Image: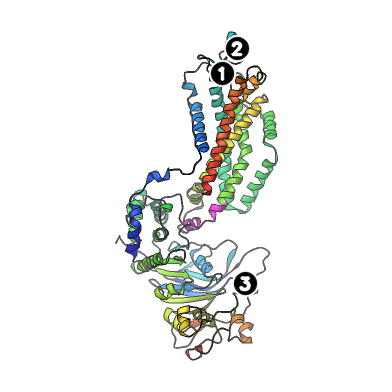
Amino acid sequence: MATMSKTRAADVRVEGLSLELDEPGVAVGEAQRLVRDVSFGVAAGEMVGLAGESGSGKSLTASAIAGLMPSGVRRAGGTILIGAEVCPPGHRHPDVAMIFQNPMTSLNPSVRIGDQIAEAVRLRHKGTSRSAARKRAVEILEQVEVSQAASRARQYPFEFSGGMRQRAMIGIAIARDPAVLVADEPTTALDVTVQRGVMDLIDRLRTDLGLAVLLISHDLGVMSERCDRLLVMYSGELVEVGGTRQVLDQPAHPYVDGLLRCIPDRAMAAGRLQPLLGQVPPPNRWISGCRFADRCGSATPACESAPVPLAPLSPSAQGREVRCIHPLTPATAGERSAR
Amino acid sequence: MTELVTGALAPSASKPKASARWRVRGVSWGARLSLVFILASLAVMVLVEYLPLQDPAQQDLVNTLAPISGEHWIGTDELGRDLFSRLLWGVHTSLLAGLTAVAVAVGIGLPLGLLAGYLGGWVDQVLSRLADVVLTVPALILLLAAQTALDTSIQGQMAVLGCIFAPRVLRVIRAEALGVSTAAFVTAGRMSGASHARILLRYLLPGVRAQVVVQISYLLGLAMVVEAGISFLGIGVKPPDSSLGTLLIGASALLSSHPHVVLVPAAVLTTLILSLNVFGDSLTEQRKK
């Protein structure tokens, strides 16, 4: 095991984050915000999963934390805190590192792997000499479990396999000595066997370096194994928050419940697979009330008329929050299902 | 598990093969021959001063239009000057002129194209529209107009030609940079805290490198055609200096009586331009693979 870098433990807090389109000629109302009122925190040493389907705003939320908002999107409200420091929109906090979905394209194809890591080291620690940064790069490659790190450091990305590239990518991320790691679907593009290795690595770095890890994924299986807590997004809103086990065992939001009923292993135990009917509405058809109402079996007129707040599920359930006026309870969950 | 994965991959990684990067597959013989011819011409361009050649301007009025012989490898022209020597010096002048134009074109077009593609927005709009304006006027007319106004030497004319070519380079590089700058690794670089300047130099420039080489090979051929054209028209390279263009004017009247005087420089010019194009094409093909 290589030398361990010192990291300042810090947590992330996102409070009331809202993002909206910033295009001339596009009328945007409160209801059409791409991300609406998202609040959560990730403590140092904790891994929190942010789940949601494509277009649910999970990647956008991650980009906002990393300060890499795509052009045409602007922060409409809310604050992002790294440690005690408030990050203004577009600010790339030096303590935040991010790894991306596709390791095939996220490395500079014309620069040697070692030099790319060394570059990140020197950008973070100004004044580090080239040779010291190179040495550090080899250490980092060892730390991310790339064998023969010294000779590997002299190779180009095309000489690395997918899993190795993702390790190199993680190496670049930790070269910044981050406190917070935002992992945007880090294993989606990888083979299942390689996935496990990469997730093991992220998990180990989290404990070793005390990183606060935000894992963005749509793979509930990976999340159920790795995450302490789970955040589920739907159409730009957090719909359910809680400990991973509680959320998966006893979902309170009908969307999460419907989602879990689509997993064959779980559903077959109950007899049949129940598809979640309908489609995610596009942002221009979003309403100010519950955005899941038109697909929900237990929707009432009240659901669509006014915004539904993210509220604690019950006084006794620690950290469980749900955005629903008719949350499922263990008693009702059995008989209810998505329409 | 992890050990197993890394272990399984290790054998192929144990021998970093530097030579693999230089091994070229699927390159046609035409492209290889072209490269040889281009390199030979470049060698002539650089070394012509040191070659044991006859003086290209030395007239020998007794031996005008001499046939091919041991003394004059491809004969002499209408003033008895050694054609072989004039031909090599012509290659020297023409290539140097072409390179001047290309250097100016790339010197202007590459940085501006990178900026336009990377920054986008109004910078891109302004630069692209300016490029459009220059591109609407035919190159030769613009060049003749500039020559009328400036009355410069061949190097000056080629610098002007470079300015005329710059918008083509700008357009190609802009399009390329636009593609590269949306790649995930550029975002990753910004995430590592790289400045705009660093991203332009370390991320975008290597990304457009291949395209630059392709452009250089095309434009070099084009610049040499233009040089031959304007020299033929009587501006450009002036006698007694020889360029591939002036060799053609001098000999054009002799086509029926002494064809080799015309055909040899014409063949060299054609082969060189063809080589540059074939080479450029094969680079483009390689990039598509």
Amino acid type for the residue under numbered disc 3: Pro
Q: Would residue B187 be counted in the magenta stretch?
A: yes
| Camera-nearest residue between B76 and A309 | B76
> Looking at the picture, does residue A88 appear above or below residue B33?
below
The 10 Å Cα crowd at callout 3, few under 14, some 14 to 19, many 20 or more, is few
Residue tagged 2: B64
Q: Are marks 1 and 3 on the same chain?
A: no
Q: Residue furthest bottom?
A: A331
Disc 1 marks which residue?
Answer: B83
Name the secondary structure under disc 1.
Answer: helix
B246 relative position to A191: left or right: right
Q: Which mark is on residue A282?
A: 3
Label 1, label 3: how far apart the Cα atoms are: 76 Å
What is the chief secondary structure element of the magenta stretch? helix
Report how far apart the C-alphas of labels 3 and 2 lie in the structure. Answer: 84 Å
Chain bearing tag 3 is A
